[in-house]
Image (cartoon, grey):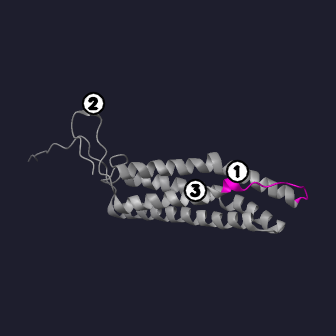
Amino acid sequence: MTTATHPRPTRTPRRLGVRTRRAVLVTHIASAGAWLGVDVAMAVLIVTAMTTDEPATLIFSLQTLELVSIWPLLACGLLCLLSGVALGLGSKWGLVRYWWVAVKLVLNVVLTGLVLVALRSEVTTQAELARRLAAGEAVTFDLGNLVFPPTVSPTLLLVAITLSVVKPWGRIRRGAGSGSGATRSG
């Protein structure tokens, strides 16, 4: 007894099973929500540090900021990135098949990278100044650069969430050299 074989398409993406996809999707959504939560906590601490007249409150705010921002943000960003990549590779949307997915990927990489490149050094510097103030040294604070992370990050995260819901722009066209399968965006 022989069975007929059907030719398979050359590029069949490997799809996640329903349960696995749901688990990865919940992880992705939860990590993005946690990321927003850490951003809100950062904003509260930064606004408190910028508006207080009490040295003890300033010290507490900046030292707490160091504890609750860098590693939690990095963990949320990496978990969101990994789960997003898994969803992209394991679903019909692909990783760079649609513009909205590609933009979300870029936003995630940039925001996660900024935690290490820019935020970490600024928060560490301000926390060290707070420790020196606590030790009785006279120090001057410039907290102006701390305004950007809790405003830029939540804004871009909300853009990414909106992209996930709206799914604008259509497919990314294949390169001119591929000669086949170019689709219209829209």
Name the spot of residue 98 as percent of width and height, x first: 33, 49
Q: Earlier in the sequence, mark 3 or mark 2?
A: 3
Q: Which mark is residue 122?
A: 1
Q: Does 76 sit left or right of 50 as displayed?
A: left
Magenta stretch bounds? 135-146
Q: Which residue is mark 2?
A: 177
- Determine whether label 3 and label 2 are within 8 Å by CB: no
Q: Write down the quadrant of residue 91 in the picture.
A: bottom left
- Find the residue positioned furthest to the top: 177
Q: Which mark is residue 61?
A: none
Residue type marked 2:
Gly
Q: Earlier in the sequence, mark 1 or mark 3?
A: 3
Q: Earlier in the sequence, mark 2 or mark 1?
A: 1
Q: Residue at x 46, y 47 (%)?
A: 106
Name the spot of residue 2 as percent of width and height, x first: 9, 46
Viewer-proximal residue among 74 and 45: 45
